[in-house]
């Protein structure tokens, strides 16, 4: 299924796609394409979500993807996030998941002294 299936063009849709692409993303795509043309296999990509987390997305032999959250301080190994239906993500589900969980959280209303966080 196409990763755009079922998406709306509503401006409030967190999974909406834009035409703007960061230079680092363009460069990564360029080197991956060049490596592929030379016979190399690109088996994983590193993604940084707006909330500051780092993710590794690995490809599978079945055409799906596996998702790992990388621990920022390196004390814990990668934490795998399983898809709803098994280990393997489809491209569309993976993109939607990262868009949903990767947005910065509202921390302005936290009571840090008592560690009371907002519920919404």
Image (cartoon, grey):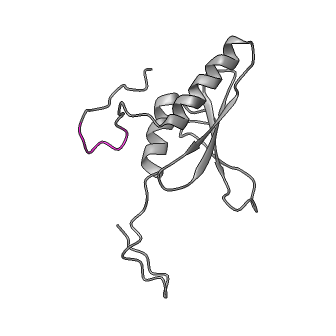
Depicted 120 relative to depicted 94: above or below: below
Among all residues in the image, which is located at the extreme left? Answer: 10
Is residue 30 covered in magenta? Answer: no
Give residue 83's position: percent from left, percent from top: 56, 39
Of 31 and 49, the residue lying toward us? 31
Residue at 23% of width from left, 38% of height from top?
Answer: 10
Q: Give the image quarter of residue 82.
A: top right
Direction from residue 5 to residue 50 in the image, left or right: right
| Magenta segment | 10-15
Give the quarter of the image for residue 110: bottom left
- Find out whether residue 14 is within the magenta segment: yes
Quadrant assignment, res 29: top right
Location of residue 119 in the rendering, given as x and y in whole percent from the top left corner = 38, 70
Provide residue 67's location: percent of width, then percent of height. 62, 40
Residue at 68% over, 26% down: 60
Image height check: is 102 above or below 105?
above
Classified by dominant secondary structure, the portion drawn in magenta counts as loop
Observer-nearest of 17 and 19: 19
Q: How many marks do you count on the picture?
A: 0
Q: Depth check: give the residue in front, 89 or 69.
A: 69
Q: Is residue 63 left or right of residue 12?
A: right
Which part of the image, by quadrant, shows the C terminus? bottom left
Q: Position of residue 46 (x, y in %)?
A: 63, 40
Q: Is residue 80 above or below residue 51?
A: above
- The quadrant the N terminus occupies is top left
At x 61% / y 31%, what residue is drawn?
65
Name which residue lies at 43% across and 83% down.
Answer: 111
Examine the rendered structure and indicate whether residue 38 appears above or below residue 101: above
């Amino acid at each position: 299924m196409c990763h755009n299936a079922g998406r709306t063009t509503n401006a409030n849709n967190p999974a909406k796609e834009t035409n703007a692409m960061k230079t680092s993303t363009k460069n990564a795509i360029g080197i991956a394409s060049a490596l592929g043309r030379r016979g190399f296999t690109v088996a994983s990509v590193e993604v940084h979500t707006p909330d500051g987390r780092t993710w590794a997305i690995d490809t599978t032999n079945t055409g799906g993807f596996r998702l790992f959250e990388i621990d920022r301080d390196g004390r814990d190994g990668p934490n795998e996030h399983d898809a709803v239906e098994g280990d393997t993500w489809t491209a569309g589900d993976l993109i939607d998941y990262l868009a949903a969980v990767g947005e910065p959280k509202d921390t302005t209303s936290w009571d840090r002294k008592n560690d009371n966080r907002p519920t919404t």
